[in-house]
């Protein structure tokens, strides 16, 4: 079974609900988490929308997102509303100029999420008997192996949520056994994740 963006979103939404049921949240932390969840849901939704091969090219993805952002009436209204205070001197040119940077952020975040999903599906096929190994993508997504289909479970290190705003084409992947870091490497292309997990599983096998 292929791991999908919908499964990823469900995994992410599940843990905060579990913590809430256990009474592990306060009002301030809860409000902040809800805002983070909305952003995460938006980014995953965009990655799912632009997962087709037609958007594998970065320029094609950028053009599609530019059309969407520039045509968003609510976003344009917010960009006008925020500067209408003395701190901005009632001018909204800065907010309009920042749209270009925002589009670049979306491009990088969407490509990152697509790559992570691809990596997770590779990992799921290699996960048999490796439940004691976890992978952490860019200090954000914490991937555990499980026996049940789809053989992976994803969590989010919410304290590192800010790292989504500065994501690059390559990103760090850490392999952990419990809290012990087995190795950490940059993931620059799809083949890298095969090499990373193969080395990690061999290290675990040698240690048993």
Image (spheres, grey):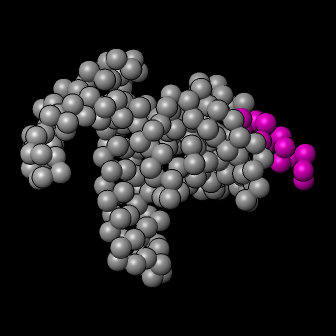
In the rendered image, residue 41, in percent from the top left (x then y), is placed at: 33, 50
Residue at (26%, 21%) from the top-left corner?
A: 63
The residue nearer to you, when weighing 29 against 61, is 29
Examine the rendering and report whether any part of residue 160 can be seen.
yes
Tell me, yes or no, whether the highlighted magenta stretch contains residue 197: yes
- Residue 100 lies left or right of residue 152; in this view the side is left
Quadrant of residue 27 within the rendered picture: bottom left
Residue at (40%, 60%) from the top-left corner?
A: 13
As displayed, is residue 18 above or below residue 144? below
As displayed, is residue 62 above or below residue 148? above
Examine the rendering and report whether any part of residue 113 can be seen.
no
- Of all residues, the one furthest to the bottom in this rendering is 23
What's drawn in magenta, residue-wise? 196-208
Tell me, yes or no, whether the highlighted magenta stretch contains residue 72: no
In the rendered image, residue 160, in percent from the top left (x then y), is placed at: 51, 53
Quadrant of residue 179 within the rendered picture: bottom right
In the rendered image, residue 101, in percent from the top left (x then y), is placed at: 31, 31
Residue at (36%, 35%) from the top-left corner?
A: 105
- Residue 65 lies left or right of residue 186; in this view the side is left
The count of marks equals 0
In the rendered image, residue 17, in percent from the top left (x then y), is placed at: 41, 70
The residue nearer to you, when weighing 66 against 14, is 66
Residue at (41%, 42%) from the top-left corner?
A: 165
Magenta stretch, main secondary structure class: helix
């Amino acid at each position: 079974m292929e791991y999908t963006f919908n499964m990823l979103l469900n995994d992410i939404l599940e843990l905060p609900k579990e913590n809430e049921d256990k009474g592990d949240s306060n009002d301030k932390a809860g409000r902040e988490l809800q805002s983070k969840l909305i952003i995460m849901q938006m980014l995953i939704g965009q990655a799912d929308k632009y997962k087709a091969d037609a958007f594998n090219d970065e320029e094609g993805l950028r053009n599609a997102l530019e059309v969407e952002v520039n045509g968003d009436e609510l976003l344009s209204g917010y960009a006008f509303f925020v500067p209408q205070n003395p701190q901005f001197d009632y001018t909204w040119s800065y907010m309009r100029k920042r749209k270009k940077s925002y589009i670049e952020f979306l491009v990088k975040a969407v490509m990152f999420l697509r790559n992570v999903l691809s990596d997770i599906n590779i990992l799921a096929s290699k996960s048999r008997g490796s439940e004691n190994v976890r992978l952490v993508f860019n200090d954000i997504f914490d991937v555990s192996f499980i026996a049940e289909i789809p053989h992976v479970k994803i969590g989010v290190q919410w304290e590192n949520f800010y790292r989504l705003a500065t994501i690059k084409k390559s990103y760090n992947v850490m392999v952990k056994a419990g809290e012990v870091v087995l190795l950490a490497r940059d993931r620059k292309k799809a083949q890298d994740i095969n090499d990373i997990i193969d080395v990690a599983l061999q290290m675990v096998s040698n240690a048993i």
